[in-house]
């Protein structure tokens, strides 16, 4: 009987933790993108701090999320929204030369700028579609 009470209490605690830990779409995608970027960084002498990178990415992801919400409020069709989303893939949006990592006061070029850009744009697209489709 005592084991049953502990099991029920454990289920209640776990279900409450699951509800309390839900993140917004921009935060979830920014964190996931930062985590993917950190796995792509291979220098053994430095590492990417995922939480700080997430904080740096978050304002842009929130802006894109709100852009998706605004496009939905304007009544754009799925095709028109797709055209807007295709603009994120434009190489002029984020040229390879702008892909930098900062370490203390120094800036370094990203090891694989094409893959880093792809990860970043993929996160932006997912965030845009979450805003457009009303997912939070």
Image (tube, rainbow, N blue to C red):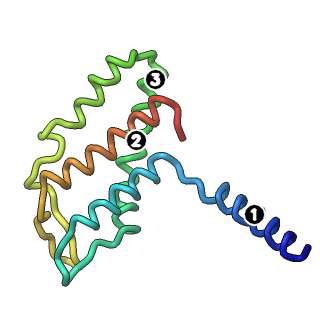
Where disc 3 sits, the SS reads helix
The percent position of residue 61, horizontal first and vertical second, equals 38, 47
Residue shown at 64% from the left, 58% from the top? 18
The percent position of residue 42, horizontal first and vertical second, equals 18, 73
Instruction: Looking at this view, name the residue that lies furthest to the left.
Output: 97
| Res 127 label | 2
| Residue for badge 3 | 72
Disc 3 versus disc 2: distance between alpha carbons? 13 Å
Query: How crowded is the residue under tag 2: few (<14 C-alpha within 10 Å), some, or many (20+)?
Result: many
| Residue for badge 1 | 11
The percent position of residue 73, horizontal first and vertical second, equals 49, 22
Quarter where residue 1 is shown: bottom right
Quarter where residue 125 is shown: top left
Where disc 1 sits, the SS reads helix
Front in this rendered view, residue 110 or 39: 39
The percent position of residue 108, horizontal first and vertical second, equals 12, 70
Tag 3–tag 1 contact (CB < 8 Å): no
Disc 3 versus disc 1: distance between alpha carbons? 38 Å
Closer to the chain start, of discs 3 and 2, is 3
| Res 108 label | none
Q: Is residue 126 left or right of residue 22?
A: left
Disc 1 versus disc 2: distance between alpha carbons? 32 Å
Residue shown at 52% from the left, 49% from the top? 24
């Amino acid at each position: 009987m005592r084991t049953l009470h502990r099991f029920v209490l454990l289920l209640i605690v776990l279900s409450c933790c699951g509800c309390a830990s839900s993140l917004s779409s921009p935060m979830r995608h920014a964190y996931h993108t930062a985590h993917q970027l950190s796995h792509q960084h291979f220098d053994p002498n430095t590492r990417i701090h995922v939480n700080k990178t997430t904080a740096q990415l978050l304002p842009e992801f929130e802006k894109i999320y709100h852009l998706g919400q605004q496009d939905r409020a304007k009544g754009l069709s799925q095709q028109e929204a797709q055209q807007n989303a295709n603009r994120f893939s434009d190489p002029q949006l984020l040229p390879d030369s702008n892909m930098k990592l900062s370490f203390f006061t120094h800036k370094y070029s990203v090891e694989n700028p094409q893959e880093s850009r792809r990860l970043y744009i993929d996160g932006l697209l997912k965030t845009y579609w979450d805003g457009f489709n009303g997912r939070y």
